[in-house]
């Protein structure tokens, strides 16, 4: 869309894209820069998504505050709709916190906090509950002034009930009452979420150290957080105590509004100046570098730790360097903290936002993720086919980050002249209503027998059998993943119920339940990424696994299923199936020559790769992933 016009606006740059919409930098006829938010064409028939888009425009139109991103215009563009917003030249607070890896300097952090409190008090007085306060929704401009963003799930009214919006929230910033569906949500819930943001800014870490969804929920409901000045000893008592009060489990024990919260955080000028000086002396860098923070990769669930003093940090670095040396001796830091961890094993590739190495595989130039060795929980007690749940040990392996796309499969067919099972038969299976029918001419080129794949290069290939999927993987020098490989990549080491965690799916995490009624691009659902960063491990299309289908106990290490069988395993659910099919333990099976417009695949590869591929892989990875 670069250099195209939407209404009176010339698109100049992409600012981001998700499963349902995209944001663009654009200029007006008089040269002013704005941000355009546009719905993606494939969701225009989804009434729920369109209604949410209208809702955000209605909320923004009601608000006019210097610390809230301003709505400038809302207009239809042909069949689509466009929100025109103030362009904020800056960075998400989320990235600024991640870049600092410790407390923010006191003066800008205090000013950001006070501005945010003023903005949310204004929104509340105008009858708006934000309901999704988190660092990612607060932009910090180059003058260190915050702008509140994303009112997509906000509510007009002083209270709100629980609805599907709850499942769109970031678990780290959810007040405990959100987990009790019998309670109403009011301004005190927003106060709790903002206090969690302030805790990170001033203490340099989150109040709860849990990383798994269920553990984080437990912490919100049961754990009393340490006061933030335990981790930032020079933080004024007024600020620390105000944040602690705002984090009370019972809403009745919190502040009644943001103005009361703000008054509790007041400090006199002398205290402000003294604390600013002390903080600046104890931090390695007492400035906020907006430009450097912009360069940070997109991060999710970053665990922030307290920054060491300069001498402690130097000692820790020296300790790691000397201990890692070839027996030259060791260095004992005088820092009273625990000894530094051993240096991390370095792999070829570039770390993704989840902290796992990605490579570009030479065979088809696909992005693959390195899955670490270790145990995970496979199976479940839900259904007999999934029993028993058991701990499985897996060696390292690579697996495709994305489903194999139409474009990739088209290249394979052009080079190899491969003919799929559906093409040989002259038909493929398509579900029409509740019935499955053999539709003439249905194949990977025309999955439903009617619609060509033209314009859908980045959608997953479908209407492929196990044989077709395996042939592609072998052509690239890879293989289909075993069921254990697939399930570990989906669930993570703790056996999450869904790829993204324990929360039920919604229209931001997966393409399922006929919400859209067709496939979507393989990179459309950022919020649905698995523990390791893989996309579409739930929804879009089912995925073939290497194993023959069997039930019962599995081998305890690297299970690969029985040596023979009649049907192969498929997993992952599809765009037509309900939420139950998206559970990572869910499994089904079909014959090797069975193809359907709901079936696709991804590939896996052994670790380490053969020597003849390593040099090419390293070169491609550095070039394409930007190491």
Image (cartoon, rainbow, N blue to C red):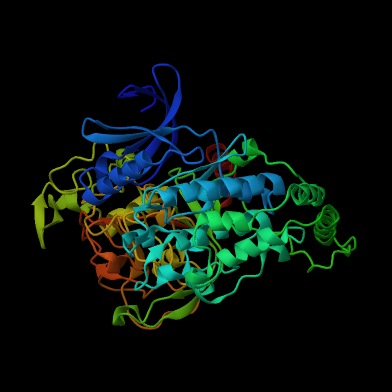
Where 452 falls versus 216 (above or below)? Answer: above
Where 386 falls versus 567 (above or below)? Answer: below
Q: Quadrant of the N terminus?
A: top left
Q: Name the side, left or right, on which 201 lies relative to 523.
A: right
Viewer-closest of 518 and 409:
518
Quarter occupied by residue 343: bottom right
Q: Name the side, left or right, on which 595 lies relative to 534.
A: left
Residue 502 can be seen, yes or no: no
Quarter occupied by residue 595: bottom left
Q: Give the residue at x 54% y 40%.
A: 620
Pinpoint residue 448: horizontal percent, then vertical percent: 16, 49
Q: Quadrant of the C terminus?
A: top right
Where 237 falls versus 29 (above or below)? Answer: below
Pinpoint residue 3: horizontal percent, then vertical percent: 38, 22
Viewer-closest of 203 and 242:
242
**Residue lying farthest to the top in this orientation:** 30
Viewer-closest of 529 and 559:
529
Pinpoint residue 550: horizontal percent, then vertical percent: 32, 77
Viewer-closest of 396 and 89:
89
Where 563 falls versus 106 (above or below)? Answer: below
Quarter occupied by residue 159: bottom left
Residue 563 can be seen, yes or no: yes
| Total numbered labels | 0
Pinpoint residue 167: horizontal percent, then vertical percent: 37, 62
């Amino acid at each position: 869309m670069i250099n195209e016009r939407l209404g009176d606006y010339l698109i100049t740059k992409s600012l981001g894209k998700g499963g349902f919409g995209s944001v663009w930098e654009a200029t007006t006829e008089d040269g002013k820069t704005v941000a355009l938010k546009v719905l993606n064409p494939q969701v225009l028939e989804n009434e729920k998504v369109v209604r949410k888009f209208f809702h955000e425009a209605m909320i923004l139109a009601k608000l006019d505050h210097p610390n809230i991103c301003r709505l400038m215009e809302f207009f239809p563009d042909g069949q689509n709709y466009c929100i025109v917003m103030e362009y904020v030249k800056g960075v998400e607070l989320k990235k600024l916190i991640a870049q600092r890896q410790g407390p923010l300097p006191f003066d800008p952090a205090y000013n950001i906090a006070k501005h945010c409190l003023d903005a949310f008090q204004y929104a509340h007085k105008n009858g708006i509950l934000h309901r999704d306060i988190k660092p990612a929704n607060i932009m910090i401009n180059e003058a260190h002034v915050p702008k509140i963003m994303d009112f997509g799930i906000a509510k007009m009214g002083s209270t709100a009930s629980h609805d599907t919006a709850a499942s769109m929230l970031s678990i780290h910033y959810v007040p405990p009452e959100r987990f009790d569906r019998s309670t109403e949500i009011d301004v005190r819930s927003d106060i709790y979420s903002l206090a969690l943001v302030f805790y990170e800014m001033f203490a340099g870490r989150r109040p709860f150290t849990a990383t798994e969804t269920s553990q984080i929920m437990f912490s919100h409901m049961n754990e009393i957080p340490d006061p933030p000045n335990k981790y930032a000893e020079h933080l004024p008592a007024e600020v620390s105590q105000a944040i602690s009060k705002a984090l009370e489990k019972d809403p009745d024990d919190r502040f009644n509004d943001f103005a009361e919260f703000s008054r509790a955080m007041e400090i006199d000028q002398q205290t402000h100046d003294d604390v600013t000086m002390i903080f600046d002396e104890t931090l390695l860098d007492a400035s906020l570098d907006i430009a450097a923070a912009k360069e940070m990769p997109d991060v999710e669930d970053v665990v922030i730790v307290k920054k060491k003093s300069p001498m402690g940090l130097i000692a820790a670095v020296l300790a790691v360097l000397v201990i890692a040396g070839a027996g030259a001796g060791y260095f004992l830091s005088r820092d009273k903290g625990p000894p530094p961890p051993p240096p991390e094993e370095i792999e070829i590739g570039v770390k993704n936002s989840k902290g796992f190495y990605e490579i570009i595989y030479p065979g088809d130039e696909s992005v693959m993720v390195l899955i670490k060795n270790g145990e995970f929980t496979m199976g479940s007690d839900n259904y007999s086919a999934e029993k028993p749940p058991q701990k499985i040990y897996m060696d390292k392996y690579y697996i495709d980050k994305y489903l194999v796309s139409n474009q990739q499969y088209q290249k394979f067919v052009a080079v190899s002249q491969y003919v799929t099972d559906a093409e040989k038969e002259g038909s493929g299976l398509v579900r029409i209503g509740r019935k499955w029918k053999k539709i003439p001419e249905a194949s990977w080129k025309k999955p439903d027998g009617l619609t060509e794949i033209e314009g859908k290069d980045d959608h997953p290939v479908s209407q492929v059998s196990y044989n077709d999927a395996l042939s592609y993987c072998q052509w690239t020098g890879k293989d289909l993943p075993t069921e254990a490989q697939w399930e570990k990549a989906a669930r993570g080491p703790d056996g999450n119920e869904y790829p993204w965690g324990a929360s039920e799916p919604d229209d931001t995490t997966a393409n399922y339940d006929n919400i859209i009624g067709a496939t979507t691009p393989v990179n459309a659902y950022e919020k649905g990424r698995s523990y390791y960063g893989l996309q579409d491990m739930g929804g879009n299309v089912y995925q073939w696994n290497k194993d023959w289908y069997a039930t019962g106990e599995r081998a305890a290490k690297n299970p690969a299923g029985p040596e023979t069988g009649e049907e192969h395993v498929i997993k992952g659910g599809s765009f037509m199936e309900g939420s139950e099919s998206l559970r990572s333990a869910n499994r089904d099976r079909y014959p090797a020559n069975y193809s359907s417009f709901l079936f696709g695949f991804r590939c896996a590869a052994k670790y380490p790769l053969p020597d003849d591929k390593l040099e090419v892989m390293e070169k491609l990875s550095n070039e394409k992933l930007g190491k």
